[in-house]
Amino acid sequence: MGVGSGGGWKILTGVFVCSSLILLYLWIRELEINNRQKFKDGADSKGNGPYPVCGQTSSSTSGTTSSTSNIINTTEAANPGLYDDLTVIELRAIQNYMYGLTNMTIVRPSTATVRNSYIFASDLHPPRKAEALAYMAGRGPRPDRNARLVVFRGDASPPVVEEYIVGPLPNPTRHVLYTNSRRKNPVPYAYRPLGEVEYNSFYDNMFREIDSTLSLLLRESYGGTFTACENTCLTFYAVPIGSRIVQQPVRKMWVIASHSVEYFTLNNLDLIFLFNINSANSSVRVEKVLYAGREYPSLDNLALQYNTTSIPKTRIPFPRDDRNLFSSMNRRGAPVPREPKRAPRMVEPDGKRYSLKHRSVEYMQWKFDFRMSTLSGPQLYNIRFNDERIAYEIGMQEIAVYYGAHNPAVQAGDFIDSGVLLGTHSQSLVPGADCPETSTFINAAYIGEGASDEPVVLEKAFCLFELNSGVPLRRHLSYSKFQGAFYSGMTDNVLILRSILTIDNYDYVTDFIFHQSGALEVRVMSTGYIFAAFHTPEEAPYGFKLQDNIFGPIHHHMFLFKADIDINGTSNRYETLDISAEEVRNEQTTNDPSSRYNQIRFDRRLKETEMAAAYKFNFDNPMYHVIHNEQRNSSQGELKAYRIQLSGMAKQLLPEDQGNEILVSWARHQLLVTQFKEDERDGSSPYGLFDSLDPTVNFTSFLADDESIVDQDLVLWIPMGAHHIPHTEDLPVTPTAGSHMGFTLLPYNYFPECPSSQSRDSVRVEYKDQSQPSAGLRVERYGTPGKTQCVAQSPDYDQQVSDRPSSVLQYP
């Protein structure tokens, strides 16, 4: 062959090689596609499977799947339990009844103004404790269900706020003023909580006037206006002023201007208005204006001086509202991790290990009921372990945040958050972010303000889930054969009921955590945006400069929880086990009888009265806090108790009875114990934003009678808190790490041994034959499979919110 023939063979060889490589690539590609599909269908990397969806098993006869989960029913009950939230059916019946009254003209939410009478909020009014306990014990009739309504009487003379008890449900026939010796009713109209109707009136009245009067200033100084502004809008943050500060029962608030971008509390401006809202006719007028470091007596005066004199002026351009804005929560910077890889996920291999029926939960040895109080937030009732009641009620009572600054508006920032109705601010919890994807989500409903005349339904107000905490509940490794040669332990798998209250800028994660040891933990974490303010040099003692023109003012978060503990009944005692050092004779030496030795001991101290029980933490006097029934001892004759461990204590530094301190008088102590009274249901009230001159609920009255707490039905009031000096890592929002506050109820001689000894979650490793270690080891899982061979499947959240936008965000 010549040169040409040799070249042809080379071409053919090249074509063959290339074809082979293409075929090989296509074959590999087909394998990858098949494997991906197998993974998608639940197969393993070898193609075995498909694995079942977690919580389902294949039927050997029909080939279908059947759930092995416990019963999960999140619907509203047709016949609600004693502590179930008001149902939508009940709420509509309440509306129909109230709208039909002839002695009050109650208007519907969509037409309400501050000069009308309308229902501001609804809540369940739980039954009297004695009646509820009698019914649950089979010794009395079922108590009626009743609602508690907060009604704004803007058309009354004078205007007032009234609270009514309406019932019996589901078909109400009566309404009576709520009577309580510990609180006023009616309440002066100037002390009413903040609401949407009032905020709308600001826009309808004052902000049009502000725009008209200060149009040039607003556009030149800040590049926007409050109304008719499209993409360059200004907005505001209202700071109510306690009436004790202004020394008269009037309704005033500071209004801080800011750029309306994500997020407005981090974009505050040096423009502040003092609003006076006349309680007689709810008119609004501006008493003073602060601009560029100076004070002006009116809008007209500021406009005149701005236009005609050389007063100090500000130029703060309107921010570019994009993903890189420092105050936005968009991801930015170099991606971490470099390649998108999914985070670890929760799975429930054998389905859910808890049951939910409407508002009643069973988990392992625990049983409890729960609800969302519109006024005060998440609540638990009738909490039992092994069918013994540990507590009748545990729940949030109040959240308060007090600020410090040179800025007069921030100075006045003593926020009593129930004034915006705590329980209405938990909704739209996000699977895979707020709660595990395996969570069960529960709605809540109430009557309130808004454009709709229907009851308001808060979707995903709670999530309920079991969590592998990743921490051993108990364990021991006895590695040495001499010491027994075994391992035994178990993970602290817990059940968590969670709500997240978004109170304007801050978000508060509230967890009730049920451990298999019989311990119940209550935990609060704070996140969300800080309330920032405009920076000036005078703010140095109150916060750090975080961005251009912005500083983060120091503040004190405070929380109040109520815990009605019933240990072996309602006849309980509160004791402390006081730990101290003592000096004893040194028995370790025989040649010096005078030698002494120091060790620690404890002494039991019975607290006999409410004031004697008012506890202030002292590091020099450590102690345990225990609640017990004197008539019911342990099998060894010792006190059979529950211990209260406090892990969120903070000291309130403000002088007693000065300014707004009276509103958080409960924060003077770290634990308070009172005798149970029906009239002491609530440790705070939603009127606290304004009523400090004459508080509607004054907690000091709970202690004033200093009653006996020996062998009584006892209620624990547990304040928690933390001081926060914001820093740059609080931008854009404050992380939860380091913000955990809480308390725990721990069994203390209550059980013969730790109840978790019964749990199948235990793992034990031991010799198969103690006499022949060479025979190997046995892993004992007590019937629970050790391997997980199923795939997690959860609803497609992305598709759900695409189909129903209003389920997570306000949607037109």
Image (cartoon, grey):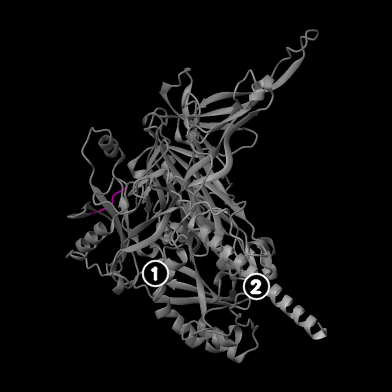
State the image coordinates of residue 72 (x, y, percent, origin top left): 36, 49
Q: In which quarter of the image is residue 363?
A: top left
In the image, which residues are magenta? 176-180
Task: Name the residue that disc number 2 marks.
Answer: 22
Pick the residue in front: 199 or 444: 444
Q: Is residue 667 above or below residue 761?
A: below
Give the side of residue 74 with respect to residue 298, left or right.
Answer: left
Magenta segment, prevailing SS (helix, strand or loop): loop
Let me know if residue 691 appears in the view. Answer: no
Pick the residue in front: 420 or 730: 730
In this view, the residue farthest toward the right is 3
State the image coordinates of residue 712 (x, y, percent, origin top left): 38, 31
In this view, the residue farthest toward the bottom is 308
In this view, the residue farthest toward the top is 591
Pick the residue in front: 553 or 246: 553
State the image coordinates of residue 559 (x, y, percent, origin top left): 50, 50
- Disc 2 secondary structure class: helix
Q: How far apart are marks 1 and 2 (CA)?
A: 46 Å
Which circle marks residue 804 in the picture?
1
Q: Is residue 778 above or below residue 645?
A: above
Are there few (<14), some (14-19), or many (20+) residues within 10 Å of tag 1? few
Q: What residue type is labelled 2?
A: Ile
